Image (cartoon, helix red, strand yellow):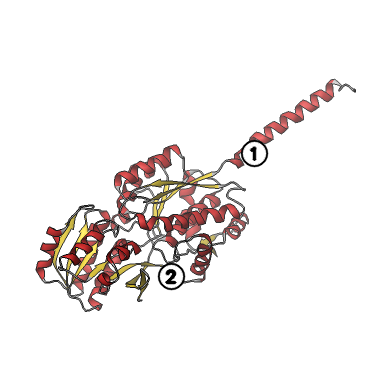
Amino acid sequence: MNKKKPNQILKTAFFSFLLIAFTSCTKKSDKAVSLGALIAMTGPIESMAPPILDSVRLAVDEVNKNGGILDGRKLKLTIGDSKCSAEGGADAAKKLVNINKVSGIVGALCSGASNAASSGVAIPAGVTMISPASTAPTFTTLKDNDLFYRVIPSDAYQGVYLGKLVIKQGITKVALTYVNNDYGVGLANSFKASFEKEGGKVVTESKHEDKKASYRSELATLAQGGAEALVVIAYSDSSGQTIVRQALETKQFDRFIGTDGMASEKLIKRIGIKGLKKSFFSRPVATKTAFSDAFDKNYGAFSKHKRKSIFIKEAYDAAMILALAIQKGGSDDRASVKANIRKVANAPGVEVGPGDWAKAVKLIAEGKEINYQGAAGANEFDKNGDVAGVFGHFEVQMGNSFKQIK
């Protein structure tokens, strides 16, 4: 056996050291980039949650199957159950921010959960949140240090739309009941102002607490004004469903007007098509484009849930914008994410959309600007982190689903 000379031993040791050093330096690429999602898996909108979560998972899956993020790293999704409540949102956000060390958060869904999670946890920690469903007008003026965005229009706009829609349906007198939280109060105020401006009259109104077993006393008062319909601004899996069911049982109302929080197929299954045949609903709708069509195709292949499920396109967009901001900044550092949200979402830039992850990464690597065109529409964030939106008029149809009238 040949013995190595001393200088050969030194060379071998030196190259071994370089190999170890190189390996330790490249180990960073093995560490996943952490993305959080605050989804109301339990609580008053739990039936809406599974399709929404699948859309976030689709975005993550597309990133990982098309080269990954930040030079091939995996994008890891961690889910927190916000329970559609302030306490649940804050608790879940604390875990995502402090334990899971997420770079950004998709969510929350309910406005109360988003408010608590952002103001109490994410904003102090410098974590960007993009909500696909929190519509309370108060977020427009939230002191968020440019860390809270939403890809869903404010209820200030939905209320205006609904007020005009009710008048167009020939209804001039309504009773109004709304859940006592950020979502209910904000939307009710916006609707009432719009409806009365159009010549309508809210003859009776009631602010109610969620999760009560009975609303019969409130309904008795609401029915005294001679209203042609009852406007219910609440959640379909909780107070909204109970109010509609008890109003039908007591025969105090047989026509209901609902907003996005009521537009759940679970409401139809529990109440029945017959009980809702005179009713109609408003909710934000996605703009139909080639980008929305691409999402529909990809979501249909990925998920068992319906492609028309509420908020799924917005949730996908929220996840994709956060991922693109991470890629654009070349870092999963929270400050870098914050700095790059508008750079990937707003014009100018080469348009990219659902399914275009590899294309977007290539453009960024070439030093080109990108402009993400979402599944739900263009996401041009204004100075408050809001987007403009489009709303639709929905009625219940056979098959336990909602049909957009226009």
Binning the other alpha carbons within 10 Å of mark 1 as few (below 14), some (14 to 19) or many (20 upward) gives few
Quarter of the image with the C terminus in it: bottom left
Under circle 2, the secondary element is loop
Task: Identify the residue at horizontal 11%, vertical 63% (top origin).
Answer: 220
Q: What kind of residue is marked 2?
A: Thr
Q: From the top left corner, tell me how far across and down residue 42 is, in percent.
A: 35, 50
Q: From the top left corner, tell me how far across and down residue 99 is, in percent.
A: 44, 37
Provide the residue designation for mark 1.
Answer: 26
Q: From the top left corner, tell me how far across and down residue 78 is, in percent.
A: 46, 45
Indicate whether 323 appears above or below 174.
Answer: above
Residue 300 numbered tag = none
Asked if residue 353 can be seen in this view, the reply is no
Task: Identify the residue at horizontal 35%, vertical 73% (top origin).
Answer: 398
In this image, 379 relative to 189: left or right? right
Binning the other alpha carbons within 10 Å of mark 2 as few (below 14), some (14 to 19) or many (20 upward) gives some
Indicate whether 16 appears above or below 295.
Answer: above
Q: From the top left corner, tell me how far across and down residue 269 is, in percent.
A: 32, 64
Nearer the observer, 165 or 251? 251
Nearer the observer, 81 or 168? 81
Residue 287 numbered tag = 2
Q: Earlier in the sequence, mark 1 or mark 2?
A: 1
Pointers 1 and 2 in contact (CB under 8 A)? no
In this image, 196 relative to 374: left or right? left
Q: What kind of residue is marked 1?
A: Thr
Under circle 1, the secondary element is helix
Task: Identify the residue at horizontal 50%, vertical 69% (top origin).
Answer: 293
**Tally of numbered discs:** 2
Asked if residue 31 can be seen in this view, the reply is yes
